[in-house]
Image (cartoon, grey):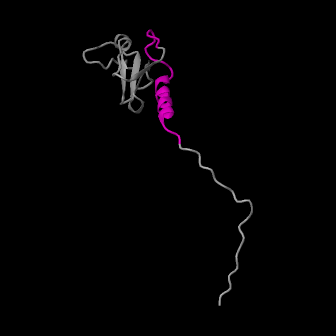
Amino acid sequence: MLKRQCCRAGCGQGAVATLTYVHRDQTVVLGPLATYAEPHAYDLCANHASRLTAPRGWDVVRLPIDYSEPAPSQDDLLALADAVRAAGTPQPAPVEVQQPDEAPRLRVVRSR
């Protein structure tokens, strides 16, 4: 199995954490190394993960990372990112449907 490396330019260290952005919620999520590489996720070494800063006004969610374990058995980071997205999605207001109390009455119209 190939060891994934830190995505920072010039860094050859092995990755131990994965970084994702939830742009809609202005949130940065840093957690254990994802099970597989995602196109919009960034793998970081222990040094770069510990020094992470977010853009001004953004929230940072830091999950516990075991820096001695190179690859976790579960992908908690993507599950958390999905939960953050779902929490930020506005829910539609419930629509009340009125049920008639009785069946509609038929009206007979005579032709002339």
Q: Position of residue 61 (x, y in %)?
A: 45, 20
Instruction: State the quadrant of the N terminus.
Output: top left
Q: Position of residue 47 (x, y in %)?
A: 35, 10
Instruction: State the quadrant of the C terminus.
Output: bottom right
Against 79, residue 66 (above or below) is: above
Farthest right residue? 102
Q: Position of 85 compared to 45: left or right?
A: right
Determine the residue positioned at 40% across, 21% down: 18
Q: What is the tally of numbered marks visible in this picture?
A: 0
**Dividing the picture into quarters, in which one does residue 55 lie?**
top left
Q: Position of 70 compared to 11: left or right?
A: right
Determine the residue positioned at 48% across, 33% down: 88
Q: Is residue 72 magenta?
A: yes
Which region shows up in magenta? Answer: 65-91
**Most foreground residue, 71 or 51:** 51
Farthest left residue? 10
Determine the residue positioned at 35% across, 20% down: 54
Against 69, residue 20 (above or below) is: below
**Most foreground residue, 91 or 64:** 91
Q: Position of residue 45 (x, y in %)?
A: 36, 14
Q: Position of residue 84 (x, y in %)?
A: 48, 29
Determine the residue positioned at 47% across, 32% down: 85
Q: Is residue 22 magenta?
A: no
